[in-house]
């Protein structure tokens, strides 16, 4: 299929800019069966066919509605007709607490990220449109977001180290344009009844957007505002990254800088730097709320030890920002490809230990077993969270302390590179 129509041209322009001269061998497409994702799949297949790229589809069935399995099967039948690989990932993780939208979104992205890594995808395409971007801006306005939030959804992002990026090639395209594309191609799609359920923020934002259209605040205008703010944020991210390179250094997955340097920073630069540190160390998909971050910063400047977003800031003249020990996950099965806490991968003489041992925090038991940990010149709270290799309760190795045959590294970017990308 030629990509001469506007949606196809937008997708081609984005993908060619993102991948430059490096043709991706495999691309994943997130397909729910709704109109946006079905149009994305068709457009991506047309683009890939002209370039020799393999396309695969993935559907996450949240099992929150009786029709969800049937919709996944409909996508499977469509893919089978076209010879497209299609995988269904099931989620049953919601316990009825917290925000359903947020929990489902977090689980969906994590599952697709691992799928993309395991299947060798160069990226995973998402069907978010200009309308989604405008709705996002409205929701963030309601939460008193600043420039970071009002830049809207990112065109490219990662949720787990070592996994392919998620890409949004249709943010310039309206939802109605994609429906027109589907009708012209005689492709059916499903309508999710949750899209009309006013209990959800996005549905209320969609209705508000319809009401604002006559005032000149339609989807196209709000998406243009987001694009303007993204350009400004790009410059600010570069400034934060340059400051990180000049003032901070990384040590065992923590960040260190003199507290006096932080105190002398311009307040907005300081806020952005610490917000980035929380994201890089803690791995939370969204930044903390502005009030919580302000209280966190005030405590740091007063020399206090504070915790926020899964990290701990250790008071003193030399500020350490590290993973909060209480927020660390349980152990995971060890092996050359295992990633613990979303950021640590161990390398060493695995042998029969692969699959038998576990990776987890050094913890208090580990510190007692390794009294030489003080030689590493790390604060105790930082040492508690060091990745360690365990087997049946016995400490086998602590790469940051042992060196030699074992080492630990992270698939994440350096902090400065992460600041530029986020």
Image (spheres, rainbow, N blue to C red):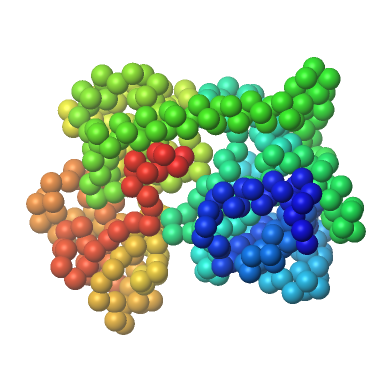
Name the residue located 43 percent from the left edge and 46 percent from the top edge.
283
- Answer yes or no: is residue 210 visible: yes
Indicate whether 277 appears above or below 54: above
How far from the left and from the top, in percent, is residue 285?
Answer: 50, 43
The percent coordinates of residue 202 (x first, y second) are 72, 36
Q: Position of residue 9 (x, y in %)?
A: 72, 48
Q: Residue at x 18, y 43 (%)?
A: 379
Viewer-proximal residue among 139 and 355? 139
Residue 98 visible somewhere in the drawing:
no
The answer to whether 347 is drawn above or below residue 289 in the figure is: below
Is 121 on the left-hand or right-hand side of 271? right
- Residue in the image at 68% along x and 50% along y: 11
**Position of the N terminus by quadrant:** bottom right
The tally of labels here is 0
Horizontal relation, residue 141 to residue 76: left or right: left
State the residue in front, 209 or 242.
Answer: 242
x%, y% of residue 328?
A: 37, 51
Q: Is residue 10 left or right of residue 315?
A: right
Q: Residue furthest bottom?
A: 352
Q: Nearer the viewer, residue 42 or 248?
A: 42
- Residue 321 in which image quadrant: top left
For the point 77% across and 51% down, the residue is 4
> Toward which corner of the image does residue 155 lie, by quadrant?
top right
């Amino acid at each position: 299929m030629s990509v001469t129509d506007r949606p196809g041209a937008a997708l081609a322009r984005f993908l060619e800019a993102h991948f430059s001269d490096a043709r991706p061998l495999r691309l994943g497409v997130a397909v729910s069966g709704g109109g946006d994702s079905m149009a994305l799949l068709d457009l991506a297949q047309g683009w890939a066919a002209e370039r020799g790229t393999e396309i695969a589809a993935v559907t996450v069935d949240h099992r929150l509605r009786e029709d969800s399995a049937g919709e996944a099967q409909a996508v499977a039948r469509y893919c089978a007709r076209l010879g497209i690989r299609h995988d269904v990932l099931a989620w049953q993780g919601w316990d009825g607490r917290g925000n359903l939208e947020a929990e489902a979104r977090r689980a969906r992205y994590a599952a697709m990220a691992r799928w993309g890594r395991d299947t060798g995808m160069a990226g995973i395409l998402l069907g978010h449109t200009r309308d989604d971007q405008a709705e996002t801006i409205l929701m963030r306005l309601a939460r008193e977001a600043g420039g970071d939030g009002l830049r809207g959804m990112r065109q490219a992002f990662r949720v787990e180290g070592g996994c392919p990026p998620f890409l949004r090639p249709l943010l310039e395209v309206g939802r109605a344009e994609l429906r027109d594309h589907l009708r012209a191609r005689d492709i059916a799609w499903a309508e999710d009844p949750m899209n009309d359920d006013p209990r959800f923020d996005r549905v209320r934002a969609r209705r508000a957007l319809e009401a604002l259209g006559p005032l000149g605040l339609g989807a196209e205008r709000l998406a243009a505002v987001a694009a303007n703010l993204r350009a400004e944020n790009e410059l600010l991210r570069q400034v934060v990254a340059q400051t990180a390179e000049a003032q901070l250094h990384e040590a065992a997955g923590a960040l260190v800088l003199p507290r006096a340097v932080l105190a002398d920073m311009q307040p907005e630069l300081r806020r952005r730097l610490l917000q980035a540190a929380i994201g890089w160390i803690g791995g939370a998909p969204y930044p903390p709320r502005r009030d919580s971050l302000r209280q966190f910063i005030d405590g740091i400047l007063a020399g206090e030890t504070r915790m926020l977003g899964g990290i701990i800031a250790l008071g003193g003249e030399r500020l350490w920002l590290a993973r909060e020990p209480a927020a660390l996950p349980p152990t995971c099965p060890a092996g050359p490809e295992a990633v613990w806490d979303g950021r640590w991968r161990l390398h060493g003489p695995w042998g029969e230990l692969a699959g038998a041992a576990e990776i987890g925090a050094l913890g208090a038991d580990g510190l007692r077993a390794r009294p030489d940990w003080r030689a590493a010149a790390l604060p105790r709270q930082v040492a508690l969270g060091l990745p360690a290799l365990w087997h049946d309760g016995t400490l086998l190795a602590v790469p940051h302390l042992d060196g030699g045959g074992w080492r630990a590294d992270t698939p994440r970017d350096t902090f400065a590179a992460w600041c530029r990308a986020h």
